[in-house]
Amino acid sequence: MTVNRLGLVVHGGRAEAVEAARVVRAWCAEHDVRCADIDVWHDGGRHSAREEVEAAGDPDLVVTLGGDGTFLRGARLAAQNDALALGIDLGRVGFLTEVPVAEVRAALDAVREDRLTLDSRMLLTVRASRRLEVPSDMEALMEYGRGPLLPPPQVRPDCDIDADWGIPLNVTALNDVVLEKLARDRQVSVGVYVSGRLLASYSADALLVATPTGSTAYSFAAGGPVVSPRAEALVFTPVAPHMTFDRSVVTAPDEIIGLRVLERSGRAAVSIDGQLRGVLDPGDWIGVYAAPRRLRAVRLGPMDFYGRLRERMNLTDAPAAVADGNPAPLWSVTTPPPGDLAHLSLLTAPVV
């Protein structure tokens, strides 16, 4: 593809990310590509995704240098601008970035020469009963360990506001949307609806809706299922609920999940991909659903999600299974699948 404008998202606290950024800038200079740093901390305040990409000159490729957190920020910007996202791996336990930092120049060459595949990922968006706001006293409470807050999401100007369907918010999530308690000594009480039907009323530390990509993040930590990132689904997971039914629910991609804060509950915080974006009062609600746009992530080879799952989660074999012998390959990984399996997705070569 033709790369004319490149946006760079760098984890400035890591020396290897800063050094890799120099490599990217040098590559851009060699190929006459405009390169702009996307810095949400500029001028001492946080900016919206639209403001960030406009400041970077509307890039058609966003490169992130860091771990999954850095990639999430870059993905939000790329989705806002319908740009490609290329994640360079500097993390430790993440699933989103796969290109080793030593191969950053080769990766950029591959993108420029169209030696790439595009990985389409589901995104989430939100409607709400009212505009989200962050009370002034929340900044100090939430700043610890997170940095200054992102601004509350704006209202989408291209969508209708409806009394039943609520206000469309200009926000996207690659991992999850979370409704969580604010008071340490009190859980939040929430009615959960799927496609307009009440599923149950929960009292819990948090309730989250995740994409398949986000199934290995907060949802997994809360006991949710691992879902292939190629799947089309939403995953609802309660966190520490005070009720017998504590399982996740996997819904179809065209089903909306509604979360209404009950009248006698405490206030609840709304977080998008780990960033606090607003606070709901009792009686308020949000609806979480698949966004019409998708993230287009750059990959340079087959996605070995399950190999990475084994590696990142440090999966070990059951002692009894090890005693019964090492497993032999089930299918050949050096030849294409036979005709009756041609419609299936199988890795046909070792992933290195």
Image (cartoon, rainbow, N blue to C red):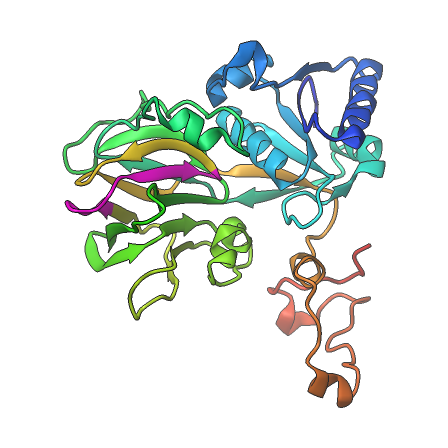
Q: Which residues are magenta?
A: 260-274
Task: Assign the N terminus to one quadrant of the image.
Answer: top right
Residue 293 in sight in this render: no
Whether the magenta-drawn stretch holds residue 266 is answered as yes
Q: Considering only vertical position in the picture, is 229 above or below 2?
A: below
> Between 94 and 268, which is closer to the camera in this rendering?
268
What residue lies at 38% left-to-right and 59% top-to-bottom? 240
Please tell me in which quadrant of the rendered image residue 128 appears: top left
**Residue 84 point in image, percent of width and height:** 61, 31
Task: Assign the C terminus to one quadrant of the image.
Answer: bottom right
Q: Is residue 311 left or right of residue 74?
A: right
**Residue 219 point in image, percent of width and height:** 47, 55
Whether the magenta-drawn stretch holds residue 337 is answered as no
Residue 86 in sight in this render: yes
Please tell me in which quadrant of the rendered image residue 68 appears: top right
> Between 227 and 153, which is closer to the camera in this rendering?
153
Question: Furthest residue to the top?
Answer: 43
Question: Furthest residue to the front?
Answer: 185
**Residue 212 point in image, percent of width and height:** 50, 53
Q: Considering only vertical position in the picture, is 290 above or below 151?
A: below
Please tell me in which quadrant of the rendered image residue 344 appears: bottom right
What residue lies at 34% left-to-right and 37% top-to-bottom? 126
Q: Is residue 340 left or right of residue 250?
A: right
Q: Considering only vertical position in the picture, is 288 above or below 62?
A: below
